[in-house]
Amino acid sequence: MRSAIIPLLDPDTPDTQDATEFKTAIAALHASLERYRLETLFEDELEHVSFRSVPLNKREALPATSRYRTIDYKVERIGGNWQATAHTSSGTALAIVSHAQYGLPFLEGDPQFVALSPERKAQLRALYVRCNPRPFTDLTSGPGALIRAGAIEFRCSCDDLFGGVIETLYRMRNMLLHGELAPHPDALAAYDPAYRLLRRMLRAI
């Protein structure tokens, strides 16, 4: 499927009728999802289904480390817990924050994190955010190449846009399967371009 769809998204390749139709369907789906906010539950967290917030699972590998002004920062999983630490170059612990769940409120509310200087808080927070186990990517804003789909401009790689389409269709499918979809005309309208995309992708199998 990937080898058949990626060329349809390639901005350096002249658009065929097939590519134009596929990109037009992506643009229509994006417009529908911007017009009506579809929300789905993932592990008890409410998430917005949108090309502006796609969980592409691009987190930093653990353990993750960084150094700034002789202070070493680390985020890792130990015994099932998320642990964020700050140490001096000699090994003296400045903060050891450990929680069973990942989340900025757990980090920022911990007394050892609160006791750090603003500069050290910023460094540890930045590393922690990069380790988010479910990071979201905005495919319309980023350093990637310009991919034009109808009137919509995506700023991402072809691989990311392909992955974004797959992930968005899967999340929409789950909403139907789990009975989360509200019976609203604008919500139902998003499934027409989604169906067209899925039908084209299945033809590639």
Image: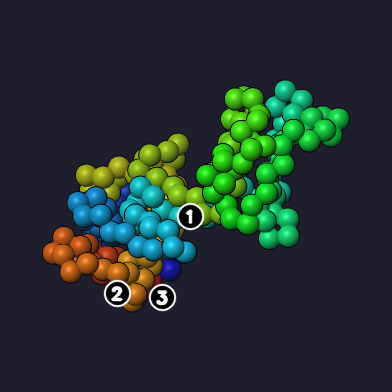
How would you rate the neighbour count of disc 2 (Cα within 10 Å): few for under 14, some for 14-19, many for 20 or more? few
- The residue furthest left is 185
Q: CA distance from mark 3 to mark 2?
A: 28 Å
Q: Secondary structure at mark 1?
A: loop
Q: Position of residue 148 (x, y in %)?
A: 30, 45
From this view, report whether residue 179 is shown above or below residue 64. below
Q: Residue at x 73, y 55 (%)?
A: 78
Which numbered disc flags the more N-terminal residue, 1 or 2?
Answer: 1
Q: Position of residue 170 (x, y in %)?
A: 38, 67
State the residue position of label 1.
56
Q: Secondary structure at mark 3?
A: loop
Q: Is residue 156 left or right of residue 187?
A: right
> What amino acid does circle 1 point to?
Leu
> What amino acid does circle 2 point to?
Gly
In the rendering, which numbered label is found on residue 205?
Answer: 3
> What amino acid does circle 3 point to?
Ile
- Report whether residue 201 is seen: no
Of 42 and 117, which appears nearest the observer? Answer: 117
In the rendering, which numbered label is found on residue 179?
Answer: 2
